[in-house]
Amino acid sequence: QQQVKQSPQSLIVQKGGISIINCAYENTAFDYFPWYQQFPGKGPALLIAIRPDVSEKKEGRFTISFNKSAKQFSLHIMDSQPGDSATYFCAASISFGNEKLTFGTGTRLTIIP
Amino acid sequence: NAGVTQTPKFRILKIGQSMTLQCTQDMNHNYMYWYRQDPGMGLKLIYYSVGAGITDKGEVPNGYNVSRSTTEDFPLRLELAAPSQTSVYFCASSYGGVNYGYTFGSGTRLTVV
């Protein structure tokens, strides 16, 4: 059962553009939604995370938008740079009492000059 | 700090062989996890541990075993390797579960032929 659905599978964006990756979840008990960034040959690394008590969280060029009623959240990368080219995973979990993340299927982002 | 160290980085196994994927962390993290990553499938949790002596199954535990005799080490054992176990395996650790973020190792690429 796919509890976190992620789209698109791959994305090509021009340098300076906005990259948008979307995720949808099914389990209404989820209350923690991180994004992980993975470069080739490396393990994923935590990029940014949000809780459902806020609708948006921004860290530098990276923003998470959260829509609790629609059970959706998205990652926006502003002014996308070639160094942002990586695979991005959304994830979800229940914060307490269930200490494991459920990951989406990943989005391969390529930023072209 | 070395972080999370996984060995070996690459391995080719024949069907029916067994092997142990090693994972060690030097951050004194209580929580440790094993994921497998397959193209287009994201990261699937195999086993996890919330402390020495405590392990639990994840989403895809069949064909694998784990032990956690120390805080630092969390080896993953493959018995009777099958082609379906061809994958990239990631070990991760966390100080206190999902809220503290996961630190991933650089992965082990396993091919079963």
Image (tube, coloured by chain):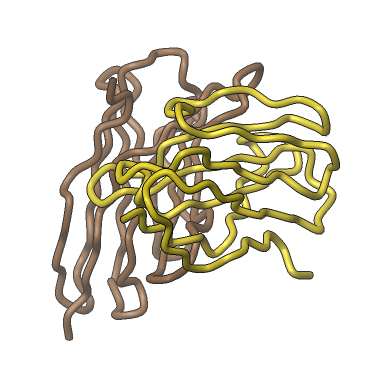
* Viewer-nearest residue: B91 or A69: B91
Residue A103 placement, left or right of B104:
left
* Viewer-nearest residue: B39 or A9: B39
Q: Quadrant of residue A28?
A: top left
- Judge whether A106 appears above or below B10 on screen: above
* Residue A32 at x, y percent in the picture: 51, 30
* Residue B26 at x, y percent in the picture: 81, 58
At horizontal 68% and vertical 40% (from top left) the residue drawn is B32
- Judge whether A30 appears above or below B75 on screen: above
At horizontal 32% and vertical 60% (from top left) the residue drawn is A87
At horizontal 51% and vertical 26% (from top left) the residue drawn is B58
Q: Quadrant of the N terminus of chain B?
A: bottom right
* Residue A1 at x, y percent in the picture: 28, 20
Label total for image? 0
Chain B pictured colour: yellow
Q: Quadrant of the C terminus of chain B?
A: bottom left
Q: Quadrant of residue B103?
A: bottom right
Please identify the residue farthest to the top as the structure is shown.
A28
Residue A99 placement, left or right of B80:
right
* Viewer-nearest residue: B40 or B83: B83
Chain A pictured colour: brown
- Judge whether A40 appears above or below B42 on screen: below
Please identify the residue farthest to the bottom as the structure is shown.
A113
At horizontal 24% and vertical 39% (from top left) the residue drawn is A6
* Residue B38 at x, y percent in the picture: 31, 48
- Judge whether B92 appears above or below A96 on screen: below
* Viewer-nearest residue: A72 or B90: B90
Q: Quadrant of residue B3?
A: bottom right
Residue B49 placement, left or right of A58:
right
